[in-house]
């Protein structure tokens, strides 16, 4: 698909379901990604603008709900995950939105 475009190194931090000192325990996995930025405007009385990023991730381990993504020493909370499949049904990548 975009094999030569996955150049950014990221770390996926998946929750294990356990808590240590009231914080979720996370397991880290390295992965490669294509990253794009976007701005979303919500039409309300405040005219809210939210800046976010879309990570197209190619990894053997997929991010789970509640995961965090670390890129260049910045940690992002995962908001949306969509699986990208090949025509034959294989998982090729996943599209993750963060704010």
Image: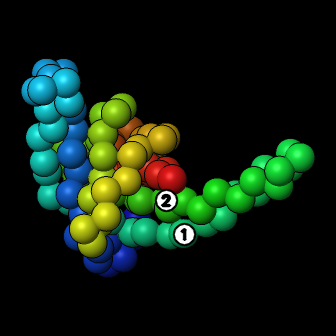
Secondary structure beneath label 1? strand
Q: Quadrant of residue 7?
A: bottom left
Q: Residue at x 49, y 59 (%)?
A: 54
Residue 57 position within the rendered picture, expressed as x and y whole percent measured from the top left? 34, 57
Q: Residue at x 50, y 69 (%)?
A: 36
Q: Quadrant of the N terminus?
A: bottom left
Residue lying at the far right of the rendered structure: 45
- At 37% from the left edge and 53% from the top edge, which residue is drawn? 76
At x 10%, y 27%, the residue is 20
Residue 31 in the image, given as x and y percentages of width and height: 20, 59
Q: Depth check: 25 or 33 in front?
A: 25
Q: Which residue is mark 2?
A: 54
Total numbered labels placed on residues in the image = 2
> Residue beneath label 1, please?
37
Q: Residues within 10 Å of mark 1 (few under 14, many from 20)?
A: few
Q: Nearer the viewer, residue 57 or 79?
A: 79
Asked if residue 1 is positioned above or below residue 48 in the image, the reply reads: below
């Amino acid at each position: 698909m975009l094999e030569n475009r996955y150049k950014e190194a990221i770390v996926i931090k998946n929750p294990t379901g356990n808590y240590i000192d009231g914080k979720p325990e996370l397991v880290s996995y390295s992965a490669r990604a294509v990253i794009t930025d976007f701005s979303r405007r919500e039409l309300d009385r405040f005219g809210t603008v939210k800046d976010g990023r879309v990570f197209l991730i190619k990894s053997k381990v997929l991010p789970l709900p509640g995961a965090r993504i670390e890129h260049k020493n910045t940690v992002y909370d995962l908001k949306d995950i969509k699986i990208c499949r090949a025509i034959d049904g294989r998982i090729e990548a996943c599209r993750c939105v963060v704010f």
